[in-house]
Amino acid sequence: MLSCTSGDEALPARYTGCLCHRPEIHSLMRRVGTDLSRRGFVAGIAASVAGLASPSSANPAPVQPQPAILFTNARVFDGQSDTLRDGLQVLVEGDRIKALASGDHPAPDGARVVDCGSRVLMPGLIDAHWHCLLAGLPMAAAMTADLGYVFLAAAAEARRTLMRGFTTVRDLGGPAFPLQQAIDQGLAMGPRIYPSGAMLTTTGGHGDMRHLSDLPRSSGGPVSALERTGAAAIADAAAELRLRAREQLLQGASQIKVVGGGGVSTPRSPLDMTTFGLDELRAAVAVAEDWNTYVTVHAYTPRTVQRAIAAGARCIEHAHLMDDATAALMAEKDTWLSIQPFLGDEDSVPLTGPSRAKMQQILAGTDTAYRLAKRHGVKTAFGSDLLFSDTLTARQGTMLTHLTRWYGNAEILRMATSGNAGLLALSGPRDPYPGKLGVIAEGAFADLLLVDGNPVADIALLADPGKNLVVIMKAGVLHKDAL
């Protein structure tokens, strides 16, 4: 039995007694006792608890080597081809795919052998537009609940996201950094996260969810309660925008999200509005380029999309209301389109008032936007952007099936694997997970799904992951094994 000391006597640096007297816990309690903001409090807890499992902690837990796994008798969708490759073996060592070969090869000593039974082995799915902290909670709770509760709910939703087969997400607004750290260090279970940090908006732009009592705002003055949570950052001049962009990069953002126009869920931001001026957008792009990464811009209308492209944005989020000339410009400038296949009311939470009217505009424009993107050969990414409901987020795989209106099944699977990986690669040196994603190939991350059926023939299999995904592996770790 470990016994607890009763006083505050000095403890050795490598104290191994009760947890409550470990130096790391003392450090954590000192953090809690300081005058931190609510955001800093949660980040401090995440950093301190994560430190208990890090190699630099006083008593690090021993790391058990992961045994090699050999998948045999697999039909492989490699993330890049139109068809399946039959009778393959895939060897996983550590977090990578060691080998991919046809035939019957002996397993390495100590390796586990998984007979796929001619099921389809494919790369883990990637969602290019996700909000880790806003996906599973109602809007009122996400905006007003204690931030500690929001993070706990986000961790639960992250686990559900992974169990739907999405092994990687790009977070497009919110303080996802502590959650990303917890997942990476094994304290929570979820997809790897490419975080943007706070979405950068102007006063009155999409993402400005402040109470009107917070007005007027003084440029350079104290930040609002909304901004202290890290969900959004308000900037009304190029200098402010540069500052806010650098703050996100300082925290570990892999890309910068700038709000170029109005949005659906912010009631007071008209969909047709354009926020930042060209010089301001260029300031944000310059900061991202100095950090060797990129800016993606939230934009729906032709004017807003074209201004973002003129400023040097590498990716546009949404663009559901774009016209032919805008699509042609995107193709000409090699700008990525990250768009969501919203088809009906079931693809969003129930909306009222201005938000419902704006969502109806989006629904009406979806088909045209996809057809224009296809016609002009715009590089298109899949993202779901499901918000404010754990019931709605369960439709993440269903959103993939919506794409059959414009694409074949193999095209859809490529878009949600190797295609989205190409977008993530724009982060360059700011990529938190350098390596090959979205493919089954030697040296790639071992993110693998074993599907009970053939998704190239029936993409609807991915809409019911609980039934049809029998194995889910991320970075060589089995998170589901129904075999």
Image (tube, rainbow, N blue to C red):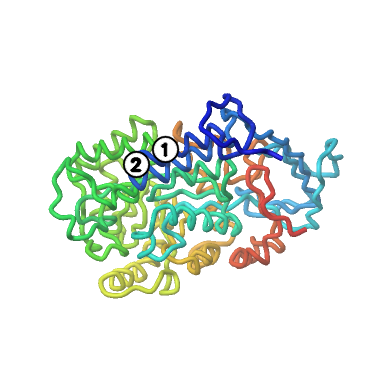
Q: Is residue 430 above or below residue 78?
A: above
Q: Amino acid at mark 1?
A: Arg
The quarter of the image holding the C terminus is: bottom right
**Where is residue 261 drawn, in percent x and y?**
25, 55
Figure quadrant of residue 82: bottom right
Mark 2 neighbour density, 10 Å: few (under 14) some (14–19) many (20 or more): few
Q: Are marks 1 and 2 in contact (CB under 8 Å)?
A: yes
Q: Amino acid at mark 2?
A: Leu
**Where is residue 388 drawn, in percent x and y?**
41, 64
* Residue at point 21%, 39% (across, down): 240
Q: Nearer the viewer, residue 10 or 123?
A: 10
**Where is residue 158 drawn, in percent x and y?**
53, 54
Instruction: Classify residue 340 as left or right of residue 87.
Output: left
Q: Earlier in the sequence, mark 1 or mark 2?
A: 1
Q: Which residue is mark 1?
A: 31
Q: Nearer the viewer, residue 96 or 454?
A: 96
- Asked if residue 302 can be seen in this view, the reply is no
Q: CA distance from mark 1 to mark 2?
A: 8 Å
- Asked if residue 280 can be seen in this view, the reply is yes
Figure quadrant of residue 454: bottom right
As drawn, the residue found furthest toward the front would be: 6
The quarter of the image holding the N terminus is: top right
Label annotation for residue 36:
2
Which secondary structure lies at badge 2? loop
Mark 1 neighbour density, 10 Å: few (under 14) some (14–19) many (20 or more): some
* Residue at point 55%, 41% (across, down): 184
